[in-house]
Image (cartoon, grey):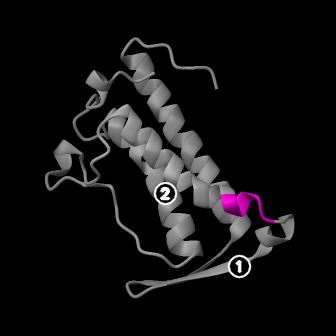
């Protein structure tokens, strides 16, 4: 529903663009499942701009609808595999360690729930942007 010519729309200079509202959905799934749960690498796709008054910069090249859909699909697949596991797996505790932060522990249930909540948040953000552009958001 978001026309490509509005990918760079943002209500205020310090906010995310409409395109940058979509990227964190896939970025979060990549960060939590392949990185935290499975121990893979991590990179941020939307990073703070050097000038905070200008908001954010995009560090990932997905610049059209097809590329965004492919990115969302690619990083939802690992999440989907965990959703298909037996319910007993939800209580699995994942320990996350990084040198600069204290060790943290999460249940798989918490991580999957957090990802769902995160996606709902960004979808609602995008719906607001669409309304500000005069576009009726798709039904959810």
Question: Circle 1 sits in a helix, a strand or a loop, which is it?
Answer: strand
> Residue at 57% of width from left, 66% of height from top?
33
- Does label 1 or label 2 sit earlier along the sequence? 2
Give coordinates of residue 6: x percent, y percent.
29, 24
> Residue at 34% of width from left, 61% of height from top?
44
Quadrant of res 48:
bottom left
Give coordinates of residue 52: x percent, y percent.
19, 50
Q: Nearer the viewer, residue 136 or 82?
A: 82
Give coordinates of residue 35: x percent, y percent.
50, 72
What residue span does the magenta drawing correspond to? Answer: 81-85
Q: Quadrant of the N terminus?
A: top left
> Residue at 35% of width from left, 21% of height from top?
3
Residue ID for mark 2: 28
The disc at residue 50 is: none
> Residue at 27% of width from left, 48% of height from top?
61
Number of callouts? 2
Give coordinates of residue 75: x percent, y percent.
51, 55
Residue ID for mark 1: 93
Question: Circle 2 sits in a helix, a strand or a loop, which is it?
Answer: helix
Marks 1 and 2 in Cβ contact (< 8 Å): no
Q: Residue 92 lies in magenta, yes or no?
A: no
Relative to 113, is 19 on the left or the right?
left
**Residue at the left extreme, as displayed:** 51
Q: Quadrant of the C terminus?
A: top right
| As drawn, 108 above or below 64 | below
| As drawn, 98 above or below 70 | below
């Amino acid at each position: 529903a978001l026309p490509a010519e509005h990918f760079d729309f943002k209500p205020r200079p310090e906010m995310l663009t409409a395109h940058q509202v979509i990227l964190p959905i896939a970025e979060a799934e990549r960060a939590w499942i392949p990185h935290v749960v499975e121990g893979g690498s991590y990179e941020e796709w939307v990073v703070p701009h050097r000038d905070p008054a200008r908001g954010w910069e995009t560090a990932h090249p997905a610049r059209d609808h097809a590329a965004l859909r492919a990115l969302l699909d690619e990083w939802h697949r690992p999440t989907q595999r965990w959703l298909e596991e037996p319910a007993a797996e939800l209580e699995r505790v994942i320990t996350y360690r990084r040198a600069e932060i204290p060790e943290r522990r999460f249940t798989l249930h918490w991580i999957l729930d957090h990802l769902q909540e995160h996606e709902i948040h960004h979808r609602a953000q995008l719906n607001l942007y669409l309304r500000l552009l005069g576009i009726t958001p798709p039904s959810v």
